[in-house]
Amino acid sequence: MLPTRLAMMSHWPRSPSPDNLAAPTGTFPFANWAETASTRAWALARSLSGAVKAHSYDLIHAVEESAFLARWIGSRRGLPYLFDMDSSMPRQIMDKMPAMKLAGPIMQACERRAIRDALAVVTMCDSLAEHAGKSGAKKVFVLRDISLLNTDSTIADPPLKQQLGLQGCCFMYIGNLESYQGADLLIRAFSGARQR
């Protein structure tokens, strides 16, 4: 049975990072950030809870960290949620901010709980599907990213290559610039390849 409506939840408006948390004095204003984050989280939770109460949703579609709110709201309203998982958030946070490794076990336990309590988990790759399965997911589905490019070899090169005066092999990186993606490594590799 397909749900008639979805309560859509989106990404947190601004994730904590050393760049947006550094105070002018060079100190780490964790207390200020934590107060602001908790105020935002409660406001968002109240707003979403009100929306769920006002409408007859069959399912909450929870993307990434919104799964934690979906779990809380869903348990209060008897509403299941689908965990749309694009990454392991504890792993991503600990990779980006090594000091957060101290909180790693707590973050990982929270993630496992969100995975276990979800009606199903949808991942974008086999590695995350395996992680969700090991974490106790009831059902796991993989929706892989697919290329929207026409792979027919009879099609001529795009005019952009000619417009830019590029010759030979060309590569394009499409993705975010978070450090875990390794874009810096790719740029260094291009530089090294060019010198050879």
Image: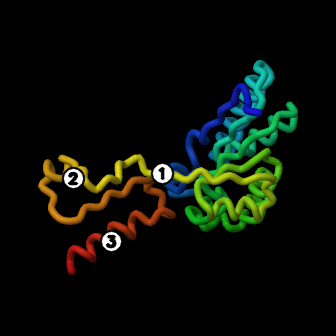
| Residue 34 image position (x, y, % from top left) | 68, 46
In this rendering, the label closer to the viewer, 3 or 1? 1
Q: In this rendered view, identify the residue nearer to me: 112 or 35.
A: 112
The residue that appears at 30% across and 61% down in the rendered structure is 171
In this rendering, the label closer to the viewer, 3 or 2? 2
Badge count: 3
Mark 3–mark 1 distance (CA, rounded to whole Å)? 27 Å
Residue named by callout 1: 146
Answer with left or right where residue 37 lies relative to residue 119: left
Residue named by callout 2: 157
Q: Amino acid at mark 3?
A: Arg
Q: Residues within 10 Å of mark 1 (few under 14, many from 20)?
A: few
Badge 3 or badge 2: first in the primary sequence: 2
Q: Is residue 46 visible?
A: yes
Residue named by callout 3: 188
Mark 3–mark 2 distance (CA, rounded to whole Å)? 26 Å
Q: Amino acid at mark 2?
A: Asp
